[in-house]
Image (tube, rainbow, N blue to C red):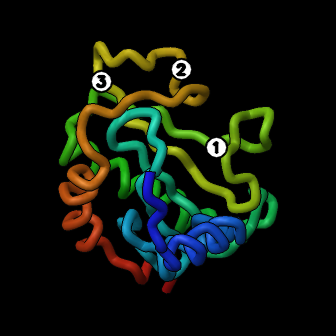
Amino acid sequence: MKTMWAPWRIDYILGEKEERCIFCLAMGERSELTLFKGHGSMVVMNKYPYINGHLLVAPTRHIASLEELSVKEMAVLLKTVEQSVAVVKKVMKPDGFNIGLNLGKVAGAGVEEHLHFHIVPRWFGDTNALAVFADVRVIPEHLEATYGNLKPHFDRLDPGLWE
Ligand SMILES: [Zn+2]
């Protein structure tokens, strides 16, 4: 087997080791899965979704716990959850949703340091009934296709909820 000289790989590998917060990155240079950047809240597609349409809603501030949220941040965050559910309902027509927080590793939190709500659309007959917050599944529709379907609707949301 030939060894390819690929200097960009080194930057990539070193970059990966930085382990910077994926939510903070999603507000800046790694926004390819970011659906919404508001003044106090953000919406990103889960890169490793439990099911197609699995979204993550987070405060823009890098905080780990509910207690650190101001009343205003909480209001903006929940309003964004509501708006995200409305978009997914319209575009993907699920039969229901699981919405929740995984706080702490023991509860299944993948990224502990930046608080985020999971929005998981559910359809009758989907196979994830009991495994929604504990398992990784194969997704039928490609992540990018779903992103493309949802993004125009998120682009119409008001980023200035904060005012
Ligand atoms: Zn962060």
Report the side of 134 relative to 114 (left or right): left
User: Which residue is at the far bottom?
Assistant: 163
Q: CA distance from mark 2 to mark 3?
A: 14 Å
Relative depth, front residue between 141 and 14: 14
Residue beneath the point at 36% across and 57% down: 83
Q: Secondary structure at mark 1?
A: strand
Q: Secondary structure at mark 2?
A: loop
Report the side of 102 relative to 78 (left or right): right
Which numbered disc covers residue 131? 2
Report the side of 73 relative to 51 (left or right): right
The residue tagged 3 is 123
Report the side of 30 relative to 62 (left or right): left
* Relative image position of residue 28 (x, y in whole percent): 50, 81
Relative depth, front residue between 115 and 138: 138
* Relative image position of residue 55 (x, y in whole percent): 43, 50
* Relative image position of residue 161 (x, y in whole percent): 44, 77
Q: Amino acid at mark 2?
A: Ala
Occupied quadrant, residue 140: top left
Q: Secondary structure at mark 3?
A: loop
Mark 1 Cα within 10 Å, few/some/many (few <14, many 20+)?
some
Which numbered disc covers residue 101? 1
